[in-house]
Amino acid sequence: MHKGPVDTAASPHAKLRTLPLDAVEIDGGFWKRWQDTNQAVSLRHGYRQLEKSGNFNNLLLAAGKGEGDYRTPVFMDSDVYKWLEAVGYELARHDDPELVQMAEYAIRLVEDAQGEDGYLNSYWQVVEPQRRWQDLQHGHELYCAGHLFQAAVAYYRGTGDERLLNVSRRFADYIDSVFGPGKRAGTPGHPEVETALVELYRATGERRYLDLAIYFLDQRGRGLLGAHRWGTPAYYQDHVPVRDAETVEGHAVRQLYLTAGMTDAYLETGEPALMAALERLWQNMVSKKLHVTGGLGAQHAGEAFGEPYELPNERAYCETCAQIASIQWAWRMLLATGERRFADLMELTLYNAFLSGVSLDGCRYFYVNPLLSRGSAPWLGRKHIVRPEWHGCACCPPNVMRLLASLAHYLVTTDATGVQIHQYTTAKLTPEFDGRKLALRMETDYPWSGEVKLAVAETDGRPWELRLRIPDWAAPAKLAVNNTPLAVEPGTAYATIHRAWQPGDTVTLWLEMSPALLAAHPRVDPTRGSVALRRGPLVYCLEQADQPADVDLQDVAISPNTQMAASWQPDLLNGVMTVQLEGVAYDTSSWDGTLYRALDSLTPPQGRAV
């Protein structure tokens, strides 16, 4: 049984239980191609880049075996750990001897680099050993430890190999001996260790790890990071105690990893003050700081959340890691509450803000994901207009790899009453609940088609409940069991079917996928007078390349009543559903040489249909 990134089987305050990775096999459809590319191309590409960039040599230096200079930034170890986490979950999908050999090498490096006292961070062991724990604000020691713990849990769950888990337990025990009540006071400048410690607790049963995670959460907002030499306390989420937080602030990845850790702590403790704060933070984020693609983190300065309604298009930051962190937080909130809104944001982010971060061939990555590009962005450099193979700060590529490798984890849950399906793709499902074993088959061409078919292959004849998410964009939805229609009331979050299922029973769900135009809140300044185009879970991009040579997209307008039609293009982007609609290209030649005019001197612009 290969458990996934979050195991809520014994979490007392989880409303939903996660399934083992081998209980959900994505074996066709949209996401299988992405998973297969991740396995065949991305993970091997990542290994070569870790060699080339010096990550492995840094660990060799820490073990006294490397040559040459240490390569920065200080958090290079975390890229190795995220890659190992991805490999662990990939090996839970199927055997891959070459990946095992690569992982064996990396694990030996980690084992050899660990100090006798359990400490492990190659930068602070090699470059500034006398300053261990002296720079919690920017040193990333606890951040790297968190990614180590997650890698160890993943590799143990995916393979049964305990070596990395043993390294992690030694390091976690050492950290616990340093920090805590009556010991050294501190909290990480970059949250991550909190959610990782909770998962290490779930994997080992060692309560001290959960207590240490809660301790680090409790210390935020108390000034323990000292004078902030870069940014404000809010950049580090150190401006208020976590239970008093009202708004998402500062560095977006830090904020979202922190809220994921807070949610993990709630799942284990049920503390009302934590959930109250999480609800406030969520509502602030989705009502004032969320891009139409699900992107988060508006500002380049500090890779940070902006002010309310500060949602630029061309200069949006939307770091790929932030979108992954958003999915991680939303998943934990879904597990805690069972509410559709969290699964809805996961879907929006997966198909849009996240997937833009990786190329179709699986070996090029965006760090920044703006919503508008003119083909040049001097403030970014060319690397953010064209996906590079790697980055000097390479946090995003292995983060993409670990999400794709573990994607099956995020589709289905169970509770005492039955099975819930939150995301749709072609898959074989073998969930268990209440001591009962089921087998279902899900078939769909989602996200291109809204038709989802399920067939029951194995059940014991006793009644149980099947719940299917109806996305917030899908109105109306239709449902049938064994070809007999069932009513789906408008506003239904999950279509619920309770019956004594029999092998051979079928369910068909139809989700309406007509193209639609979206408008933003009037306070979102960059999008006034603009619309976005959505079909199903996908937000579409209008591209200059699709227009006649004499049409500039900057001069094109769309009527709110325009007719839109979708058509399948099998030879475009490995197959994609495109949307055609009519607009008007306005003649702006009379403005040549002029930037401003008196309003009363203007005449209606002349245009032609395009």
Image (cartoon, helix red, strand yellow):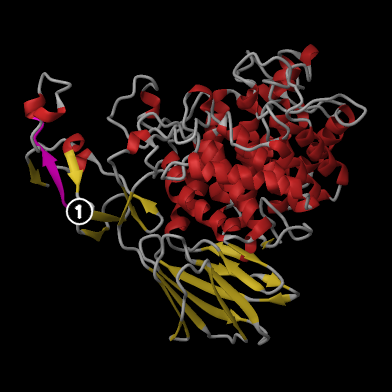
Q: Amino acid at mark 1?
A: Leu
**Residue 379: in magenta span:** no
**Dominant secondary structure (helix, strand or loop) of the stretch shown in magenta:** strand
Q: Residue 239 falls in which quadrant of the image?
A: top right
Q: In this view of the protein, which residue sits in the foreground, 20 or 582? A: 582
Q: Is residue 94 visible?
A: no
Name the side, left or right, on which 515 lies relative to 274: left
Q: Name the residue located 33 percent from the left edge and 38 percent from the top edge.
A: 527
Q: Name the residue located 42 percent from the left edge and 58 percent from the top edge.
A: 30
**Residue 585: in magenta span:** yes
Q: In this view of the protein, which residue sits in the foreground, 609 or 507? A: 609
Q: In this view of the protein, which residue sits in the foreground, 271 or 497? A: 271
In the displayed structure, 137 sits above or below 498; it is above
Name the side, left or right, on which 303 lies relative to 419: left
Magenta residue span: 580-588
Badge 1: residue crowd in 10 Å (few <14, some 14–19, many ≥20): few
Q: Name the residue located 50 percent from the left edge and 47 percent from the top edge.
A: 38
Give SS at disc 1: strand
Name the side, left or right, on which 195 lies relative to 557: right
Q: In this view of the protein, which residue sits in the foreground, 177 or 563? A: 563
Q: In the image, residue 220 lies at what x, y percent? A: 74, 30
In the displayed structure, 490 sits above or below 122; it is below
Q: In the image, residue 453 lies at what x, y percent? A: 45, 74
Q: In the image, residue 59 lies at what x, y percent? A: 69, 25
Q: Which residue is mark 1?
A: 581
Q: Name the residue located 53 percent from the left edge and 35 percent from the top edge.
A: 396
* Residue lying furthest front: 600
Q: Is residue 118 visible?
A: yes
